[in-house]
Structure formats: C-alpha cells, structure tokens
Image: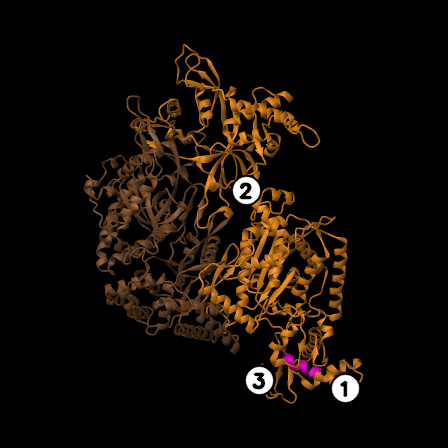
Amino acid sequence: MDPAAEAASVGVQVKDDLSEKCQKLFVEFLEEFRNQNGDILYLPDAEELIRPERNTLAVSFTNIEHYNQQLATTIQEEYYRVYPYLCRAVRHFARDHGNIPPSKEFYVAFSDFPTRHKIRELSAARIGSLLRISGQVVRTHPVHPELVSGTFLCLDCQSVIKEVEQQFRYTQPSICRNPVCANRRRFMLDTDRSRFVDFQKVRIQETQAELPRGSIPRSVEIILRAEAVEAAQAGDRCDFTGTLIVVPDVSALAVAGTRAETSSRVTGKEGFEADGVQGLRALGVRDLSYRLAFLACHVAPTNPRFGGKELRQEDQTAESVKNQMTVQEWEKVFEMSQDKNLYHNLCTSLFPTIHGNDEIKRGILLMLFGGVAKTTMEGTSLRGDINVCIVGDPSTSKSQFLKNSKTKVARSFSCRHVEDFAPRAVYTSGKASSAAGLTAAVVKDEESHEFVIEAGALMLADNGVCCIDEFDKMDLKDQVAIHEAMEQQTISITKAGVKATLNARTSILAAANPIDGRYNRSKSLKQNVNMSAPIMSRFDLFFILVDECNEVTDYAIARRIVDLHSRNIESVERVYCPDEIQRYILFARQFQPKITKEAEEFVVVQYKRLRQRDSSGATKSAWRITVRQLESMLRLSEAMARMYCSDEVQPKHVKEAFRLLNKSIIRVDSPDVNFDQEREEDASDQNDVEEEEVRSATVPAPARPNELHKAAVPKPALRMSFTEYKKISNLLVLHMQRMEERNEESSLKRSELINWYLKEMESEIESESELIAKKNLVEKVIHRLIHYDHIIIELTKTGLKKMEKGGEEPIIEEDPLLVVNPNYVLED
Amino acid sequence: MPTVHDWINSPLGVVEGIFAQYNSSPDWEQKVLDFFREKLKDQEAASWVPSLNDVPLHYLKTSSLVKFRCMVQDMFDPEFYVGVYETAAPPPESKVLKLGKYRDMTDCEVDLNSKHVVTMERQSFYCVPIPGESQWVKDGFARCSQARVLPSTSYMPQRHKRSHEEEDDEMESQPHKQKEQLTGNHAATDPFGHGDTKRLETGSQGANAAASGCPHSLELNFPLPGEMGPACLVKVYEEWEKFKVNDVLEVYGILSVDPLLSVIAEEREGHFVDSMDGMESLEEQRAHSPPASLVPRVHMLHAYRLQHNNPLLPPAASEVSSGFLGELASIRAELIGFLTHVLLGDGLAAEYLLLHLLSNVYARRDVLPLGKFALNLSGCPPSSSYTEQLFRVLQQLVTCSHRVGMSLGNMNGLHFTPQKDYTANRLRSGILQLSPNTLLFLDETQLQQGQLDAAGVRNITALGNLISWQKVDYDFSYHQMEFPCNINVLIASEGKSLLPSDCHMPLQPQLPPPNIEEYMGALQAALPPSLLNKFRIYLTALRHQEYSISEELTKMVEEDFVEMRKEDPQSISADDLHRTLVVARLLSLSVGQSTLSRDRWVRAKHLEARRTSRTQQRTINSNEP
C-alpha cells in the first residue's frame, strides 16, 4: 500500500515534498494554461464550481502533457500519492477565483488519458499509477454518502476533534487530542460537521473483443466518487481513468497496531460482539489473500466498437472514433483506407470460406457500411439501411431427390458470417429448428410423425443487422412487422392493450427459398418467391443463386471441401482479420458523404436509362423501376463512398452502385421465353437469365448488353419477352374464364380459342404470312400454358381424364377441350 | 523420517524445505514444481495420491496432497496474496521469512510493512467433477487407486467446530456417498449390475428435483442435475492462461479444508454488512467463498489436461498397443454385432451408430467445425421404454453421457445454456456445459404438441446451434459469448427430428421383440465383461487417431465428385460430398487406418447410398397416403 496513504491514515502528517511541488505546479498549470484564443482554459470551469452541485474539475491530461511533461509524468506515476494535493490545488484555484465556502471539497478528474489498458493487464505492479481501463458495466450499486472527513466528539471530555481523515472505512481518532484525556474508544461522530462525498460502486467486465478464446471474462470493481457517480449505467461500455488500489481488507489482513484495534471497536459499536473472531485473531490466523479495486476519477463512454451502444449516434465523429483507437489500430485503418484494392480485399476477407458469388459479397459488404440516414424538411426520415435478399435453391431433406446445396451452404454461411461481423446482428430462421421469436408452438405432423416448430413474434435488434433465413417461410404477421421495420424503421408491439412503438433501425439480410423448391428460370422472380410485392420492393438488392452444373465450379467445390477435410491446418486466407474489418467499418461509418454535382448528374442519367429501358420493355411489368430504386441507388452510392472514407459521393461510386443494382435486381423478373428449345430449358435459359443470376467467380461472366430484350431477338416469332408471353396468356385465360362463367357446361375447344385470339388480333395482322406466324405463336403459347405452366388443362373428349403432364411428348388430340386450371389466379 | 509418503502427507513441508534451501533466489518456485512433477511422473506413485473423486472428503487430511479429476466450470477474478512475508514477533525472537504460497492463511503474526513482503497473483477456478461421467469410469478409477486412507487416523477432530448448516447436510450425505461407493465397487465386478440402475434412478430423480429448484445442486453449480461428488476451488499459481473453461483436468494439489477459512469468511461478511466498503455482496461471498467443507480448496502443484477419462487406457498415450491393433477387426465385428442387436437387428443403423460414437471435432475452419457427426435415429418406437434402454446400453460404452428427454416440460423448464449471474458474480451452469466428447442423447419421442415459451425457444435454438456449429452461446445478459464445444449429439425420434442433424438414419427394426426391457437385459447379460472393456477401449482409443488423405486420393475424390455431377447433377451435392468425406474418415478410423484408401471411399459411398435410399423410400411412403 502506498506509504503516503498509510501516513495520512494514522494522522501523522509527514511532509511530502514531491507532492507539494506537484501541487504548486498544478496550480500554475491551472492559472496559466491558455487555449488558442489566449483565454485561461480552466477559468470558466472553475467558476462553475461555485454551484452547490458541482465539485469536480475535469482536466485534460493531454493539456498537462503539453504544458509540463514532467508534471504529467509525476501525476501518471505517483497518481495515488499526489491526488489529494491535486485536489487541494483545485480548491486553491477555485477559491482564488470565486466566492467558495471554505469547507467545500473539490476533486479533479483527468480526461483524455492517452493509453488504455485491458482488464486482463491489471496487475499488482500497476497499483497507484494513473491508468485508463475500459469494460462493460455489468452491475451498479446505489449511490450513498461516504464520510471523507469526520468530526468527532470525545465522550469523556467533550472535546471536539476535527478533520479526521477517513480511509475507505470508518476511522475514529486513535486517541483524544486532549492531553489529559486518555480516551481511545468512546467517540461520537458529529454528522453535521463532517464532510461527505457521493460514493458508488460499479463492476465492469471484459468486453468480448478482449477476451482470449475459451476464457470466462474477468471483472473488476470500480469505485466512483463525487461527480463520477451515476455516470455509468449497466450495459454501457465505459472508459475509467483512475488507479488500481488494494482494497484494505483490514479485517483479514490487519495486524497488531492501531487499525486492527479500530476495526474491532467498530464492530463493537455496531453491536456485533465478535468474540469468536477475536478469539481466532488471538490465535493469529490470517487470510492471506486480498482484492484489487479501481478507484476512478473520470468516466467516459468507450469507443463504441461493434455492439457498442452509440453506434449510430450523431455526435460520434470520425475524429472521436479515431481517438479511441490505439496507435496500431489507427495505423491499420489508415493503411486500409489507402488500399487500392480495398473493395476486393474486404470482400474476400469477409467471406473466406464461401466460394465465388462475388456480387453477393459486395452487396453484403455495402450493407455493412450502409447509406446515410436523412430527414427531409417535412420531418420524414429516410432510411440509410440497405436491405438485401438472397433467393436460392434449397437443399431441404423434404425434397428427397438430392438437390445441390452449394447455394444453401453459401446462404446460411453468409448469414453466419454477417452475424460474426455486424453490429448487433441477429440470426434467425423463418421457421423450424433455429426458431425465431419469443414463443413458439410445437406441432406434430400426423402423417410423417415429424415435429415442426411454428415460430411466434420476431424480435428485431435496433441498430443492427437482422439475418433471416427461410424468409419466405415466415409467419405473415412477422413479415408485416418486418415490412414496418424495413421502411419506417420502427416496430409496433401490442401487449396487454398497450401499443408501443420501438425503434428498429435494422438492415435486413434475408434468404429465401423459391416456391417450387428450385428456382424456375422461366418464371418471374415474384412468382418464384413467396413474398408480397410491398416487401419485395423494400429490398435494395435482390440476388439469385442458381445451382448450375459446371465442371469447373464442381472441381473448385470438390477441391475446397476435400482440402477442408484432408488438411488440419487452419488456413483461411484473409487479407484483413475480422477485428480489423470491424474497426474499419466502424470508422468508415462515421462519414456522412454528400453527393457531388457530377455524381448527381450521373445518377439522373443512369436512372433515366433504367426507367427508359423499363418502360420500353413492356407495358405491363411485374416490377417497375421506381423512386425506390432511385433511393436504393443513392444508398448504395453512399455506402460505396463510405467504404473509401470519402466525404463526397463521386460518379465512380454511383457507377459501382448502378452496376450492382443492375446486376442484382429487379430486372430479374422477365427472362425471355424461348419456344424453340423448351426441352433443353436449362441449357438455353442459362443464357437468358445470365444477367440476373450471380455467377461464380471461376466462370468469367461475359459482359452482356443491358438491353437484352430489344437487342437479341433473332427469330421474333419463336422468341418473345416474358412480358409479351404473359400478356398473351393473360388474354387467353381471361377470355376462357369469362366464357366458363357465362356457360358452366360448355368448354372452349382449342381451335375455337385460337380463332378467337386471331380475331382479337385482327387489327394488327396485315399479311397472310403474319397471320400464320401469329397462329403459330399462339399455338406455342397454348402448348406451353398446358405443358409447362399448367395453367390450362387439356380435356380429351372421352372424359375428364387428365393428360399426362410434362415429360414425354403429349399426344395431341385433334381438338381437345381446354379449361383453365381452377387453382390459377390471374395476377394484376 | 523421509518416507515415501512424506510428499503426499505433508507437501507443504516439502515446499517450505525447498524454499528454505533456495533462500533468496527466485528459483525455488520452479524447483517446487519440478519436484512434484518428477514424483508424479511415475504412474505407480501417482496412484498413491488419494483422489477427491472417490475418497470422501472427511477421510482426507487438510494440507495433504490430493488429486482431482474435474472440469473447469468457471474462472473467478484473479486473487492477490502475500506470497512471502515476515513474521511479526516481539523483539527477542528473530523475524522469520515465511511462505504464503499454496495456503489460504497463516497462523502467525505478519509484519506487512516489512521490505520482504512479496505480493503475488493467483487464479481460482471453480471445478466440478466431469459431468455425466459413467459409473464404470468412476469405479474403474477407484479401483486403480492405491491410496491408503484410513478414516480412523486421519479424521480431523477440529471438524467438530463446524457450525454451518450446509456442513451438516454434507455430513448426512456422506454416509450415503460412502455406501454408494461400496455398491459401486461391488458393481464393478458385475458391470451390468444394479449399481448402475440405481445411479440412473438418482439421475432421473435429480432431473425432477432440479426442475423444482433443488437448492443443494444449485449451490454447487453442477452442469447436470443429480450429479454427485465434491466441487472444488482450484487455486492456480502458474500458467493459468493455458487452461480454458470446460477443460477436463487432472489436478494434483494441496488440499485445504480448514474450517477456519469459513470462519474468516463469515467474519468478513459480518464486517461488510455495515461498512461502506464491502466489496462483495452476500451472494457473491457465498459463491466465491463457500464453506471449505462443502467446496474444498486445492492449491495446484501440477495439472494436465486429460484427453479422455477412460480408466482402461493410460492417461496420455493415445497410441494403441500393437496387440490391440491385431484384435481390432474382431472387436469391430463384435461391436457391430452387439449394436445390431441393440438396434433391433438393423445392421446399417449399427454401422452409423458406431461412426457416430467415434466422431470428434478435430478442427475448426473459420466458423465451420470439422468432424462432427450428429446422428438422428428416427423410427424409434414412441410409446415404449426403448430409447431409455438404448441410452443405458450406450452409457456402458462411452465415458461421459447424458440423456435429455425433450418433453415440453423439460424444454421450457431446464437451463440449457450457462448464464452469468451478476449478483453472485459467477457463471450459472447449464446442461450444455459439457466436457469434450460427451454423448448427449436427445430423446425426441418424449415430445408432445404444445406451446414453447421464451425459455423453450431459447433452448431449442441452443440445441440447434450446438448441432450445426458445435458451439454454445453463454448468456452474459448484455451480450452472448460463444464457446466452442465438442459434444456428440444423438437424437432419437419417431419421425425426422425437428432439430438439424448431420445424418438422418431411419431405423428399420428387423425383429421387434415382444418385451424390450427383457430383450435388452438379456443382450447385456450375454456380453462378457472382458469384451465390454474391449469395446470401451476401442471407442476411446480410435477416436483420437491421426488421419489424413493422400494427394492421390484427394484427386480421385475430386474427380469422382465431378463425374457424378456430370452424370446426374441431382445425385450429389457439396453437402453430400462433405458428409461422405466425414463418413469415410470415421470408417477408416473404425478399422484403425490412418489414411483414406480407395476401398474405404467406395465403402463410404456405398453406405451413404444405402442410407439415402432408405430415407427416400421413407419419405415416399409417408407421402403416399
């Protein structure tokens, strides 16, 4: 224990030269240190101290270092010893500049202490010197007054003994000051004339980032005094500046001498007859262990690393984040920001175990950076979060024919990975095993005897990423909740008649299975995914993972997996480690890039292009390029700019955003329908849908013109855009339904239908060859409707026996009856 | 009188001797460690040390050397202590330099202002007996022990001073424990005797008790309900960074059960109730300084991590003796035969069960654990005691196991994940805090339809995470922290389980016996104990064998995969390849081969094909009606 403290406690004031010199220098510092304007920096603060609730002067340690390096070093090394003198210096300073009651105690708090220690680094060697530690507050105790300096009344001679300094525990004077009185025991505390200070204990615990794997986090008790009390709440991550002290666990450690006697007297006074204890003590039994605590003078919220509370708080700036990093950490971040190949390196480092799928990685990366949240003049807030949805072929064991599951692995992995990286990420599954929500029901399937879990309400984390697997399997009410969360960024909860709206500023990363199990390329995205249009439109990026058979990719996959199993070394190639990426993202997120003039123009041009292409494609599209996509483009551009730590959005950022959007989307819905090669659908369609599917990196995706529909239609009669096909089929179906409604009994014959259609089209047909072409076309359409989309059902004359579906060449009856599939509902 | 037992009976004397010998030089610490390490090198000598696992606590003398086979359940904050001090004696007597290491307290006056006082740091671990340890393991170790502990001579008279209620409880429980040990020893000669059944019963009773909040087990913080044995506060002086939570250790150290410890703690408590500087709350005090008679302190002198806890094998050696290797094929055949009978005549399922019992997470790459092989045995008859019987058989084979009936009550009521209790500042254990290679038997046949509450959903999620990622998220209330684990999960269910699994194996019983209990009883009775022991050695020894795939085979597997995909892209997926490789690995290990051979690969593919055809057949069947 510190000798100075020891001396003080026994009441013999040993003159401490070093401390007194320190006090003098500190007063000088307070008197003389000026800011850039030449004002005395601490004068206004000191004048504030006159207010009754104030008693602590916060001093920046860096300022002391600037002023007098030696003083700073002394304070740092001998903190515990000089602290009372520094407080005295503050008192003198305040008294010189204000009308302050003489009995008031003052304290000094040091902010901006440069180095920071981990809880695990605290050791007995650091006792007494000034330190800054950080941790998560896990427990706070109530604030109560602590006796600083007691005034005692001697019960024997009634003399008053003043200014008895208290050291952590109740300390009575060792002997009455009256020379004729020999009283050593009977004193009474005069509370009115004693001085107290607020006192609070909190406990902090190591944060996840500092924890060695497989260890239980350590904790340390913090003692807070004066204005530092109530500054930390449970759950906060805070920095504490102060010193490590040995808790004078006197009862266990104390030996012969004054303090042991004091302690026994205290207990006696409280009516605790500690005879047994005394008896043991007389035997000389001692516990040899004691504990450390941290006496803090200053509390500040920590660098909100990932999971930090103030992640998106507006008052966080890049500068403040930088300040909270260590030098090495900052150097690494700086190095990263200078990396020419940053975009690519981040992508590969983010998902080292996922093969290919670069566009998805990029999309998710940008999601982590996020766009800038804005508030319009009317007060409407526009979200900055980017939502991403991945649709891919599943490999559920329900579908017994083994499906390729590379995609599934990739999907769940990306969710997992993001969970590892993202701030407050939540990983849930839309249904089943890793059930979402607060409660769930277990239901047994009567036929297969399998149990299923039906999930209850979903919880969303504020300020985080919500990864939802099997999004399509999600309960409708959850989808609605997510819908709300995605656009309004709030979530409403109705419980016991009280409706509460909670903030849910969440980015959503969803993964969904296509309706039919496998992604059907000939259908629109909307038909492939069981999601309502409003929800779909809330996603900024849509990616489709299609399982393709390709020797090259197969080899690559096999290689990866076999490698995984044959080598035991942990060789995951990463340019940057997760910690570095986390820090970088955190830092980069502090930027609020603004759009430059050129970028603005570029956005306008690109948006126009998208719009034009959209409207030229077909009149009746399932998904239009709307303002939402414009917003998405802006968000993505901002995220790009953030990634490069840029304060402005430049055309190159917009360009990449546009490219991604174009790759991802949206444009997904309408692949061409190819009537020629229907049986080799897989092979040919690969070409057609190439644009929207995200291909593995090993397969160099040839750059394709964006204007696919218009450009590549060599045989117009046999190839048509999906929308056109849709238009014709809708026309036919509508007509058939109308006819069926009118006359329950009769059904249309095939020839009748074709004739009706040609009649409808009469105005457009000008020559005979055109008529034949049209006829040919409509026959193809009907054929497709029957055999591939199963919208129309063919009836043979002999009865209601269904034709064999799909597969072999159907036997075409001369003129079969056609009815609309009763389950088919016309869209839009 | 330097007898061989000196270092066992009074190790502190040895330590002090060495300390005096090396007086001021700092070498003495290392010398002490070397001394005990040297002594314990000898298997024979190590077996003389009494074990806390099988000798009742009150038979052991304080400050004697003991060993303890345990799992690290929690790590407390570091402790500072007076390592070296000077006695404060009145002037005529000279001051003596004394040692504070390896003890909790001193019996003389301490001069704290002396220059010679050295403050040192130590770490305390809260250790519990290995959760779910099979009775045959306990008995096996007890039999190996040669410690001579005579209750009459070493019984400490000062224990009469005890005043704690818990201690009285302990007193009551001790005769019971003793008795159990006797029956345990008895059972050892007859491995399937009723000694085990009795333990099972207590186990299930414990489960009920835990649901209703049994105070005693909560106090000791055992991961599994119904566990017995002492918990221990192990004080670690050196290299504590190398120990991790959930590690299984064999600790040699100096026992400290001095009742004065409790009194001091009590005294401190008394002080802190009124004083403002009480650093520990009452709950905390209770958790961190429980009465020494209930939770003895062990000051660690030597410890090593146990790779397995099979008493039939030497602790460190994972290599198999050559004689055993020769027998391997026949043991494997016998074991498959036995498991086939246990699985009601299903040979394919027996193969997979064997692979499952050998599985082990041998590496992790990024987030992916390698080598895990969670098995889902579906098609278990629902309304019979078959699953229970099956578990009993498996318990006889593996060293650690636990069965959880997935009834709604259990799912909603049990604590699966450990949780930090900030009031007491300790980690409250949960069922999933298990040592590596524990067999977790999930019995889904006990599930009914109904509502899962918040805790139930969390528990199911925890199980799902455990199976898919081999990690458990410990709840630190402000955040979750992942702890990697290595638990073999076997799910018995009626239909396909709602939990994920690496491998789904529908059971196809060939011969449904009329009375399952009788049938299983007869099966076990027919198994000679020597063969049973061979099974046990087989399972433990082969699990940790090295394994590799040669360059040539790597190529072949790759080409095989691409070829199969070419023929029919639906036939095999990346996931399947993954699983087949795991199957091939376990299959090779099961026959004692350390590299993959072409034959094994073909055999693995064949097994997988048979299994998948069975699952498909099943789904088609269930879809038809």
The numbered dot on residue B467 is none
Disc nearer the start of the sequence (3/2): 2
The reply to whether residue A789 is visible in this rendering is no
The x, y position of residue B48, in whole percent, is: 23, 48
Q: Secondary structure at mark 3?
A: loop
Disc nearer the start of the sequence (2/1): 2
- Mark 3 and mark 2 in contact? Answer it, CB < 8 Å: no
The numbered dot on residue A236 is 2
Q: Is residue B374 above or below residue A814?
A: above
Chain letter for orange, please: A
- Write down the chain letter for disc 3: A
Number of callouts in the render?
A: 3
Q: Is residue B475 above or below residue A249?
A: below
Choose between B280 and A37: the one closer to the eye: A37
Furthest residue toward bottom: A814
Find disc 3 in the rendering and name its residue: A808
The numbered dot on residue A769 is 1
Q: Amino acid at mark 1?
A: Ser
The reply to whether residue B323 is visible in this rendering is yes
Boundaries of the magenta span = A777-792
